Structures are given as structure tokens and as C-alpha cells.
Image: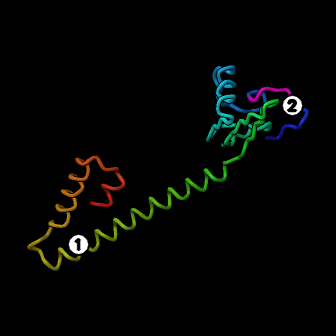
């Protein structure tokens, strides 16, 4: 985070860039005593230079002291976003491929034109009524 040992020791987490609201500190410490570990995931932290990073924070009770581990997860979050975008592009490509195949089949047999689309829409509607997730509905459709 850019702070020296001297700048960190004896200071509160919020004084060294942790922006998460830890609420009522005595209650937090009681919870820590009870469970031994408190975990904050995807916390926004400001480094000494003013850069904002995402981090996971683990507070571990060691009886005579509380150890706080902060792990920078910025790269992981960026990789997850890139993966999400790639998945979305792949879904669109698969959808376009299916549309081309449907058009080819309909051009060959105009009597059943639109049947595939109507069947897919009906299956999607039934899946939605069943309360399935959006991902499953799209897969069925």
C-alpha cells in the first residue's frame, strides 16, 4: 500500500487507506473473538500515492494481537471482467450462428418458416415460468 512499517504501526486501518466501514469496532472485536477470523472481500483501498485498488482483508485473532492481512486482488478482478466480456462475445457469436442455421433451414422449407423461432420462444417462456435462471432460460431457448 506504500506505507512504511513506521507509518503503519499503531495506526487505524482507515488512516492507512482502508475505506471499508468496519462499523462498531467493539462488536467487530467480539465477533473476531467468537469466530477467530473476519473476512472482508472486494474492499476498495487507497494507497499512499492515492491509487485505488481492490483487496481482500482477513482479520485473524491470535490471542495477544490481531493480525490483519490485506491482499491486492486488482489483477484478479480485471481478469474476471475480461473473462465476462469474452463469455458475452462468445454467447453473441453462438446466437448469430444459430440464427444463420435457422435461416438456412427456413429457406429450404418455407412451409415451416418461423417454426424454430416460435418453438424457441415458447420453450424460453415455459422455462421462465418455471423460475429458472436467466442463463438456463437462454440455454433452453
Q: Does residue 7 sit above or below 2 in this rendering?
A: above
- Please state if 56 lies on the left or on the right of 84 as rendered: right
Q: Is residue 11 magenta?
A: yes
Expressed as whole percent of the image width and height from the top left, the position of residue 56 reads 67, 42
Q: Is residue 17 magenta?
A: no
Q: Which residue is mark 2?
A: 9
Q: Secondary structure at mark 1?
A: helix
Between discs 1 and 2, the one toward the N terminus = 2
Which of the two residues, 59 or 4, is positioned nearer the viewer here?
59
Give residue 83's mark.
none
Expressed as whole percent of the image width and height from the top left, the position of residue 69 reads 75, 40
Q: Which residue is mark 1?
A: 103
C-alpha gap between disc 1 and disc 2: 68 Å
Q: Residue furthest right?
A: 6
Which of the two residues, 80 or 71, is positioned nearer the viewer here?
71
Q: Residues within 10 Å of mark 2 (few under 14, many from 20)?
A: few
Q: Which residues are magenta?
A: 9-13
Q: Does residue 22 sit above or below 76 in this rendering?
A: above
Q: Secondary structure at mark 2?
A: loop
- Please state if 45 lies on the left or on the right of 6 as rendered: left
- Please state if 48 lies on the left or on the right of 138 as rendered: right
Pointer 1 and pointer 2: residues touching (CB < 8 Å)? no
Residue drawn at 80 percent across, 36 percent down:
48
Amino acid at each position: 500500500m506504500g506505507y512504511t512499517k513506521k507509518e503503519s504501526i499503531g495506526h487505524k486501518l482507515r488512516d492507512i487507506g482502508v475505506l471499508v466501514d468496519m462499523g462498531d469496532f467493539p462488536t467487530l472485536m467480539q465477533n473476531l473473538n467468537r469466530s477467530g477470523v473476519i473476512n472482508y472481500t472486494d474492499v476498495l483501498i487507497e494507497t499512499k500515492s492515492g491509487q485505488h485498488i481492490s483487496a481482500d482483508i482477513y482479520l485473524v485473532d491470535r490471542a495477544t494481537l490481531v493480525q490483519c492481512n490485506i491482499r491486492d486482488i486488482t489483477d484478479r478482478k480485471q481478469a474476471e471482467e475480461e473473462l465476462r466480456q469474452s463469455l458475452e462475445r462468445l454467447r453473441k457469436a453462438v446466437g448469430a450462428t444459430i440464427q444463420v442455421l435457422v435461416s438456412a433451414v427456413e429457406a429450404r422449407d418455407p412451409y415451416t418458416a418461423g417454426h424454430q423461432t416460435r418453438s424457441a420462444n415458447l420453450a424460453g417462456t415455459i422455462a421462465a415460468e418455471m423460475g429458472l435462471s436467466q442463463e438456463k432460460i437462454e440455454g433452453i431457448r
